[in-house]
Image (cartoon, grey):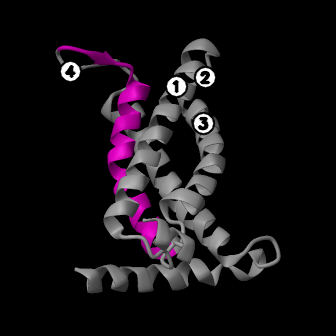
Amino acid sequence: MRKHIHNVRDLILPMIDFFYPPFRKLMGLQTYRYAASGGINTAIGFLVFYISFKFLFRELPVDIGFMAFEAHSASLVVSFCISFPLGFFLMKYVVFSDSTMKGKVQLLRYFLLYVFNLGFNYLLLKVFVETLKIYPVFAQILTTAIIILFSYIAQRNFTFRIRSQEDEFTE
């Protein structure tokens, strides 16, 4: 399995790195890879959100028997189911491949951060759509921009940080 993962990584990295030269003066390689990988994951997540909102749920409330969700909330859950595993793969194997933390620890931390971001996304989406009356698709774009800024810092310093020798002595 690990060989297949690294084969996919070896396929993706040259494609992402091919477009790096124009950005070299603006950002380091890891930041660029984060932006590219996060951009890919965000675009796919947004596409899934849009398709779910417009076509799967047809902009109507979703009743699951004991509870009903607005279409934008249900679409957020569907988007999560696709973008969570894709995002973890890209962050672990493309962006932060030099992290020495165990994969299970990374996955748990990524999940915790993702759930936090999902909750934050949900709250912002509710405020933008239901209070400020912003169309859900535009509200999701605005929400995504806010979360991206927080997420990079948290992933670099928490989820995929490189352990220092000091960390090894304290664990």
* Label 3, label 2: how far apart the Cα atoms are: 9 Å
| Residue 58 visible to an observer of this rendering | yes
* On-image quarter of the C terminus: bottom left
The amino acid pointed to by label 3 is Thr
* Label 4, label 2: how far apart the Cα atoms are: 24 Å
Residue 57 placement, left or right of 18? left
Nearer-N-terminus badge (3/1) = 1
The amino acid pointed to by label 4 is Ile
**Of all residues shown, which one is farthest toward the right?**
25
- 9 relative to 133, above or below: below
Residue range corresponding to the magenta coloring: 66-94
Residue 110 placement, left or right of 33? left
The residue depicted at 40 percent of the width and 62 percent of the height is 106
The residue closer to the viewer here, 4 or 119, is: 119
The residue closer to the viewer here, 167 or 109, is: 167
Nearer-N-terminus badge (3/2) = 2
Specify the principal SS of the magenta part.
helix
* Label 2, label 1: how far apart the Cα atoms are: 9 Å
In the rendered image, residue 72 lying in the magenta stretch gets the answer yes
Instruction: Identify the mark at residue 64; answer none if there is no mark.
Output: 4
In the rendered image, residue 69 lying in the magenta stretch gets the answer yes
Query: Is disc 3 in contact with disc 2, using a CB cutoff of under 8 Å?
Result: yes
* On-image quarter of the N terminus: bottom left
Nearer-N-terminus badge (2/1) = 1
Q: Nearer the viewer, mark 3 or mark 1?
A: 1
User: Would you name the residue on which mark 3 appears?
Assistant: 143
Q: Quadrant of residue 71?
A: top left
Image coordinates for residue 132, horizontal then vertical, percent? 64, 16
User: Would you name the residue on which mark 1 appears?
Assistant: 123
User: Would you name the residue on which mark 2 appears?
Assistant: 128
